[in-house]
Image: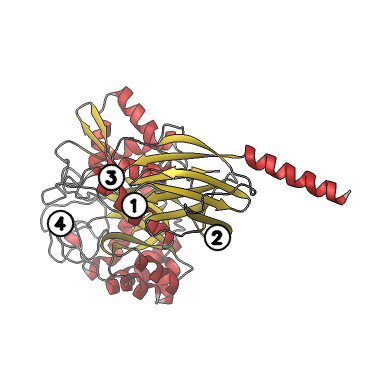
Amino acid sequence: MRKILQKFIAFSWMFCSLQASAQIFTTTANGLVKFKEQALVASSSQQQLNEAATTIQVDSKLRFQTMEGFGYALTGGSAQLIDQLAPAQQKAILKEIFGKGPKDLGVSYIRISMGASDLDAHVFSYNDLPKGATDSALTNFSLSEDTLHLIPILKKALAIQPGLKIMASPWSPPVWMKSNNGSMGGSLLKKYYASYAQYFLKYIKAMKAKGISISSITMQNEPEHGGNNPSLLMNSEEQKEFLRDYLGPIFKKEKIKSEIVLFDHNADHPNYPINILDDAKAKSYAAATAFHLYLGKEDALSEVHQKHPDKKIYFTEQWTGAKGSFDGDLIWHLEHIVIGTIQNWSSLVLEWNLAANAKFEPHTPMGCTECKGAFTIQDQAINRNVSYYIIGQISKYIQPGAIRIQSSVNNESIKTVAFALPNGKKGLLVLNTSVEKEINLKEGLHQYHFTMPAQSASTIIW
């Protein structure tokens, strides 16, 4: 009787395994295939897989960080371009970006600027004054510039995706708070540290009054780069003091729930956030460290995680530019920005930026003149660029709340990251940086075999 039962269980397992299926979504670097969907039928454990194929092994028992989301910077310029579209087009593109349907990107996290970024039409802050004037009490604080385009677009995005998370980052404080009294470079004068902390507080409360909750803030975009317009130089000691003695305490006192995020700059200087986190009081106010990858390597993110594993890692900016190519950018960004940063503990991946016109505008004087954006919006024409597919390859299929799980591969030209999804399924993003490959995917009792085109990315859900 026991033997009969064992045979029945084995037969039942084989039958279920053969009926199990996965969905695979593929994009090729030559641009001929974009999010192509196919079904995969599982192989049984008795079925011999191609031993010469590359094997990806997924282990869902080994779990790491929980993913917060994927998306873009919604700059003032992006909001302006979207806001100028005809109502039907605007509704359609916002649904495409923030919706959760099969043809939507499913963007779940965006980054906006506090005041102008370099991809606004002009420089502004929320407290601009005549030259020589000051306003420590911030009586002239106003979100008026953001009410023109950004806030209306944010409200429409939130109506589509109420769970959308928003990160806010300043490019510069009001110039009267700065050592050089100018929009580019300079430092925050210590006599205005308290006023600037109030500036953040006023911003979060004013946005809340508009129906917009700010999930997280960084204290300064690219604090080691003073050549952008606008920009501010803020070294790690200055950021530590500002956080520890001013911003952190006022957030705590006012019960502000927005996360405070450190650094927001390149991976070549992991010691910047480590220096801040080594201060126990400053660390108590910090939730995460944010990185860009214009310099350095993504393994620097793991260096910060290893020193302070109780604090999250975010990846918040990388641009695709006018001189880049679809194939080169797709492969490099998926390898380093998406897979690479997640494998090094990032729980957030954001690209820069959502939209620009055909001349890579709007931008400030001295702002980025080659930032392409996920969309090119020229008058009423809309084109989708490589960043659309870079983020889409993960945002469409891997939801916030997914947990990174272990994945390993026996081929250096194949890059992977795997997830346990909130709905109980598993997800795997695979990048093939070389020629066509035969792939065996193994996870527990599941086995799948598929072919990856040369220079391609596939997301598998099972």
In which quadrant of the rendered view does residue 358 lie? top left
Q: Earlier in the sequence, mark 3 or mark 2?
A: 2
C-alpha gap between disc 1 and disc 4: 42 Å
- Residue type at numbered disc 3: Leu
From the viewer's perspective, is the residue at label 2 or at label 1 nearer?
A: 1
C-alpha gap between disc 4 and disc 3: 18 Å
Residue tagged 1: 433
Residue 190, image x, y percentages: 24, 70
Q: Earlier in the sequence, mark 2 or mark 1?
A: 2
Give the crowd class for mark 3: few <14, some 14-19, many >=20 residues within 10 Å. Answer: some
| Nearer-the-camera pick, 192 or 101 | 101
Left or right: 161, with 81 as reference point: right
- Residue type at numbered disc 1: Thr
Give the crowd class for mark 2: few <14, some 14-19, many >=20 residues within 10 Å. Answer: some
Give the crowd class for mark 1: few <14, some 14-19, many >=20 residues within 10 Å. Answer: many
Residue 360, image x, y percentages: 17, 41
Q: Earlier in the sequence, mark 1 or mark 4?
A: 4
Residue tagged 4: 183
Give the crowd class for mark 4: few <14, some 14-19, many >=20 residues within 10 Å. Answer: many
C-alpha gap between disc 2 and disc 1: 26 Å
Left or right: 423, with 380 as reference point: right
Residue tagged 3: 143
From the viewer's perspective, is the residue at label 4 or at label 3 nearer?
A: 4
From the viewer's perspective, is the residue at label 3 or at label 2 nearer?
A: 2
Left or right: 84, with 217 as reference point: left
C-alpha gap between disc 1 and disc 3: 46 Å
Location of residue 353 with respect to 55 vertically, above or below: above
Q: Earlier in the sequence, mark 2 or mark 4?
A: 2
Does dot 4 land on a helix, a strand or a loop? loop
Residue tagged 2: 63
